[in-house]
Amino acid sequence: MTTATVSPFRFFDLVADEVERLSPTMIRVSFAGPALGSMESAGRDQRIKLFFPHPGQDAPVMPDDDGSDWYPAWQALDPAVRGIMRTYTTRTLTRDPDRLVVDFAVHGETGPGSRWALHAAPGDRLSTLAPIVAENVAYDFRPPAGTGWMLVTADETALPAVAGILAALPAGVPVRAWIEVADAGDRLELATAADAEVTWLVRGEDAPAPDALRAAELPGGTPYAWVAGESATVKAVRRHLVRERGIDRRAVTFTGYWRRGTTEDQLLAAAEPA
Ligand SMILES: Cc1cc2nc3c(=O)[nH]c(=O)nc-3n(C[C@H](O)[C@H](O)[C@H](O)COP(=O)(O)OP(=O)(O)OC[C@H]3O[C@@H](n4cnc5c(N)ncnc54)[C@H](O)[C@@H]3O)c2cc1C
């Protein structure tokens, strides 16, 4: 018997209530909202869509749709006016009071997401499309049965997801993680019960992730790999794991979180059928 995975999502209005500079690259924003009690999260690498206002708007313009048929409804709005959509990760979702926390890896004023986070202040408004059931299709960390150990590679954009993955793993699970960050100050404390060995790679000082992996001695046993970050790096890591290490490609989950020189709008447009 197979279990069907459902994907119910809906729009939520968000109001920033705390903004904290975690490190040179990471800004943590905690959000409150009128209906956050019905938001859910699978934890791990739970992805959500955030919608940002255009300059001059005090909140993103969103479709009337509640989120059940959200994509055509959002697409039908004028791109110069509708909320600007970007993909982020539920860092935490906690109760009493209901709070959604998102960690933003900032890269200057070059994109609306990064720009918003750099200037974020309590009271600022966004919208999100987020799950209303904990078991949903919008997370990818799914080790197959029989996995002996986990291999994780990420950059700072996927650091919130790695934090969620490590927090969700049970005691004793062997994990080897390589995390590339922009600055030595971006090496954050990662809470986990797993038996995790984290190697931080500071860009410009240490080897890039594919080279660090090439030089690494990996444990024996059956691995499951979760690879996320800049697209070209993700591809290079995957190629190494599958072609050079002989890891079963079905045991490698890989996701380009961003592509150098390309905005998320451009990635979305390229993925749509002509
Ligand atoms: C499933 C998923 C989960 C994600 N979770 C998070 C998260 O929790 N936190 C987070 O910060 N990001 C996360 N990202 C990455 C984020 O969606 C992208 O970095 C996105 O491009 C940011 O939007 P922007 O408006 O800042 O830049 P865009 O307008 O999309 O891009 C503008 C320019 O900035 C470049 N750029 C984008 N990101 C970076 C970067 N990190 N460093 C340098 N240049 C960059 C682009 O190549 C482009 O040239 C996630 C992505 C995915 C697919």
Image (spheres, rainbow, N blue to C red):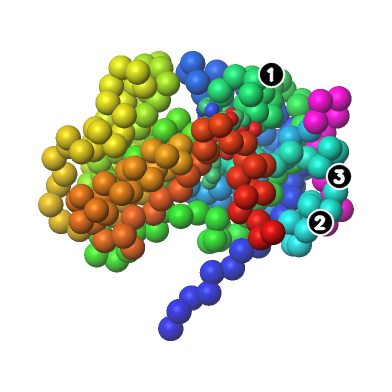
Q: Can I make out residue 6 in this image?
A: yes
Identify residue type, mark 1. Answer: His
Residue that sits furthest to the front in the current view: 274
Residue 145, horizontal then vertical, whole percent: 29, 66
Residue 70 in magenta? no
Residue 120, horizontal then vertical, whole percent: 69, 22
Residue 79, horizontal then vertical, whole percent: 81, 42
The quadrant of the rendered image in which ligand 1 is seen is: top right
Q: Which quadrant, please, contains the N terminus?
A: bottom left
Which residue is denoted by mark 3 in the rendering? 78
How far apart in space, not on screen, are marks 2 and 1 (Cα)? 29 Å
**Which residue is drawn at the image coordinates 56% and 48% (left, top)?**
47
- The answer to whether residue 81 is above or below residue 202 is below
Q: Which residues are magenta?
A: 54-66
- Asked which secondary structure carries label 2, the reply is helix
Q: Residues within 10 Å of mark 3 (few under 14, many from 20)?
A: few
Q: Which mark is residue 267?
A: none
**Circle 2/circle 1 CB separation < 8 Å:** no
From the viewer's perspective, tell me whether residue 97 is left or right of residue 27.
right
Residue 90, horizontal then vertical, whole percent: 56, 42
How far apart in space, not on screen, are marks 3 and 2 (Cα)? 11 Å
Which residue is denoted by mark 1 in the rendering? 119
Q: Residues within 10 Å of mark 1 (few under 14, many from 20)?
A: few
**Which residue is drawn at the image coordinates 17% and 37% (left, top)?**
216
Q: Can I make out residue 168 in this image?
A: no
* Sequence-wise first label, 2 or 1: 2
